[in-house]
Amino acid sequence: MTTLAKMNKWTQIQQYKNASNDYFDIEVELFEMPDNYDYWMANIKVSHPTYGNMNFICYLPKEYFNDFSYAQNMIMSSPLSRVKSILDTANGKSFPRNMYTSPDGWMLF
């Protein structure tokens, strides 16, 4: 069994300013899952002084995103936009944490 720590990963870091002018540090990690896995897995780490550290996990089925570069482009579009929209609802104490699915096949937890 391969662990995530041993897998190659692609990382992007950015800062996001939400609707309330709060700044969030976001790190997106997309793991190169072995051929015997039927999905790509991404970890979207969010950090903020008030809210602390939050993790969102995203699964992208290889059936729809058949190569790693396609998965890279996708994770930086719809799933990351969903995380940013969640951060826009932050009210000083919390924000909703639900499972999100898309017609594109990806899931965000």
Image: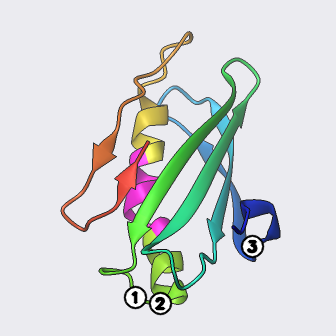
In the rendered structure, are the residues bearing label 1 and label 2 in contact, judged by CB atoms less than 8 Å apart?
yes
Where is mark 1, residue-wise?
A: 66
Where is mark 3, residue-wise?
A: 7
Q: Quadrant of residue 106?
A: bottom left
| Residue type at numbered disc 3 | Met
Where is mark 2, residue-wise?
A: 67
Which percent across, then down, holds residue 66? 40, 88
Mark 2, Cα crowd under 10 Å, few <14 / some 14-19 / many 20+, is: few
Extent of the magenta region: 75-82
What residue sits 38% from the left and 81% below the top? Answer: 65
In which quadrant is the C terminus drawn? top left
In which quadrant is the N terminus drawn? bottom right
Magenta-colored segment: predominant secondary structure: helix
Q: Which residue lies furthest to the front in this view?
A: 1
Spatial separation of the CA atoms under disc 2 and disc 3: 16 Å
What residue sits 49% from the left and 34% below the top? Answer: 87
In this view, the mark in front (2 or 3): 3
- Left or right of 82? Residue 75 is right
Q: In which quarter of the image is residue 22?
A: top right
